[in-house]
Image (tube, rainbow, N blue to C red):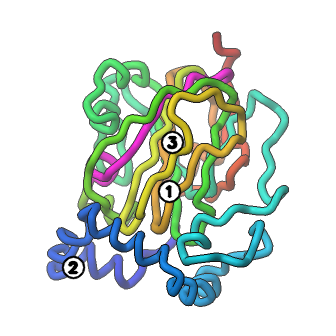
Amino acid sequence: MNEPSKTQKFLYTTVPGRCLLKVLTNPGVSALGGRIVSSKTSRLAIPRFVKKHGIDLEECATTKFSSFNDFFTRELREGARTIPEEKELLISPCDAHLTVHPIDRDSGFSIKNALYTVSELLGGDEELAKRYEGGACCVFRLTPRQYHRYCYIDDGVKEGNRKIRGVLHTVHPIAGSRYRVYATNSREFSVLHTRSFGKVVQMEVGALMVGKICNYHERHAFTRGEEKGRFEFGGSTIVLLFEEGSVTFDPQVLAASQKGCEVLVHLGEPIGKACRTQG
């Protein structure tokens, strides 16, 4: 797990920092930040950022960027990420730090000692939440250094996007100890009717200084590995909800999650396997 930055420690562990948070977590402030990093002059910040975070530019489709945000939402060259041919394998939708959390019979689950319910995550949709009782919640936490485009995990049909307004805390674990970020942050989700894993919810969660969640499609027939969207500047999170009995997760991922540890995964990397062929 990456350590919090000095700025994150100030904002989330000091009284002056928490006062400042009341301003910074406003979506309007993050939108302003998004406009700044989309300016031409913001390109000057790219070399320092690349050096600080050890980003491999050889993975990129191009190294010429019009702004910092253009760099942040960079495309990768063909072959930089691979999708396994075996359709029964569950793939990661993104580059991220992954944890898997069991959902109990009351649709509750815990992340970093913070208790959540599927219903509140879904903005109060009790009927949809019931489908995931006894299932699993996958949390993919992206940091600013990672590739910020994400894909569909299977073949299927996507329902329209549902947006939930909220604030924008960082998704670093330092915030989770004080704020229930996945229930209060701005987020967007859709229901995926998949070939191998049944009815899956995929949710994108915004975070501090994320200018925008960009999903490319409303209702849409998708293919496994097809790009679904991207996050603009900042850290962020993708959440996947699976029904009971739909997937068996990699034992190493489960063991790490039970210890409260994240596992680094890449887009397309297998993290589990379908339990059965879905109807």
Q: Is residue 275 above or below residue 2?
A: above
Dot 2: element: helix
Q: Is residue 124 above or below residue 211?
A: above
Give the Cα separation between the discs numbered 1 and 2: 23 Å
Q: Which residue is mark 2?
A: 17
Dot 3: element: strand
Give the Cα separation between the discs numbered 3 and 2: 30 Å
Q: Look at the image and give the residue range highlighted in magenta.
A: 180-197
Is residue 183 inside the magenta stretch? yes
Say which quadrant the C terminus sits in: top right
Out of 107 and 155, give the one closest to the viewer: 155
Give the Cα separation between the discs numbered 1 and 3: 10 Å
The amino acid pointed to by label 3 is: Cys
Q: Which residue is mark 1?
A: 141
The amino acid pointed to by label 1 is: Arg
Q: Earlier in the sequence, mark 3 or mark 2?
A: 2
Q: Which mark is residue 138?
A: 3
Is residue 77 inside the magenta stretch? no
Residue 134 percent location from the top left of the image: 44, 24
Direction from residue 5 to residue 16 in the image, left or right: left
Q: Which mark is residue 36?
A: none
Q: Is residue 59 above or below residue 106?
A: below
Q: Is residue 156 above or below residue 61?
A: above
Residue pictured at 33% horizontal, 38% vertical:
121
Out of 130 and 23, give the one closest to the viewer: 23
